[in-house]
Image (cartoon, helix red, strand yellow):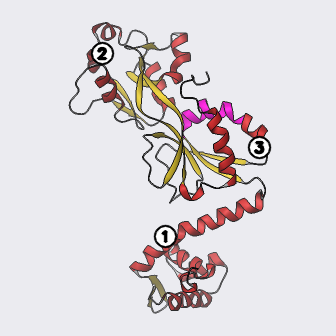
Amino acid sequence: MVPRKLLPSIASLRALEALDRLGSASAVAEELSLTQSAISRQLQALERQMGADLVLRDRKRLTLTPAAQAYAAEIRDALDRIVQASLRLQVLPEGGTLNLAILPAFGMRWLMPRLPAFTRLHPEVTINMATRLQPFNFAAETFDAAIHFGRNDWPGTDSLLLRSERMLPVCAPGLAADAARAGPAALLEVPLLHIQTRPQAWKHWFAAQGVDVSGPLAGTMYDQFSTITQAALHGLGVALMPDYLVEADLAAGRLVKAHGEPVEAQGAYYLVWPLARSRDPALTLFRDWLASQAQPEDPLPR
């Protein structure tokens, strides 16, 4: 059993968190629909229970001690999780909801075509999705799981491999025709287009071709595959792309291979979830279904 003194009331924790975030007792009172004296009493009760000074009182101004500020930052996430859990219980008490972070291109090309099959099997489960280019942060955001690209080295998580990725250099017709005939090292002489989520992709590709590259590679950086594809289509340089994303453009002749065949990327796509959420019913249903769709050896839907 957790000692009662280590489980403060939600009201006192809300007052502390709001004071840290808003900076004044009057603003806290307005947000929580309480009087300033009521806020002060809640904070005093929390100090007595914790046995520590949390608030600096300067006339009518209340500010948090450095230790209280750090405490407020930690409990903020806990309060958010209580809110999300309560919403899930109220909205869909039987099926539940799943808050999922996805990568834009992979979510559109791989997950979305498959998702109707899941909704037919489990109409009671609601999946809320938000795109994230940067690595997920389960401690700071209320995601239950994420679909992300990497090496499966995320602490405090478990994962399911969805598929690997193969990278292919492509460009507009004619841009690197001479370079392609001269060999892979000649691509160092043309503009290279980089994707923000794969900063070492070009170095890995050159190494796979037996080309030694020392130092950084020049070129322009793009944050999404949709924008780097447009840059390649308009002749701005050579882009190193997942082969499934450019198949249609290659078939139509809008893009051409700059050199060689696709190279396996250093990383893969995974469904990732925090260990604390492993037994969540909605996540379990989604994970078990997704395992039947995870076939890295099969091509992606076109």
Q: Is residue 108 magenta?
A: yes
Picture quarter with the N terminus: bottom right
Which residue shows up at 76% across the image and 62% down it?
Answer: 90
The residue identified by callout 2 is 184
Q: Amino acid at mark 1?
A: Glu
The residue identified by callout 3 is 122
Looking at the picture, how far across and down is residue 76, in whole percent? Answer: 54, 69
Q: Amino acid at mark 3?
A: His
Q: Left or right: 203 with respect to 226?
A: left
Looking at the picture, how far across and down is residue 149, in whole percent? Answer: 48, 39
The residue identified by callout 1 is 74
User: For the magenta stretch, what is the residue range?
Assistant: 103-116
Q: Amino acid at mark 2?
A: Pro
Crowd class of label 1 (few under 14; some 14 to 19; many from 20; radius 10 Å): some
Looking at the picture, how far across and down is residue 116, in whole percent? Answer: 73, 35
Give the mark nearest the N terminus, 1 or 2. Answer: 1
**Viewer-proximal residue, 290 or 55?**
290
Give the mark nearest the N terminus, 1 or 3. Answer: 1
Assign a secondary structure to mark 1. helix
Picture quarter with the C terminus: top right
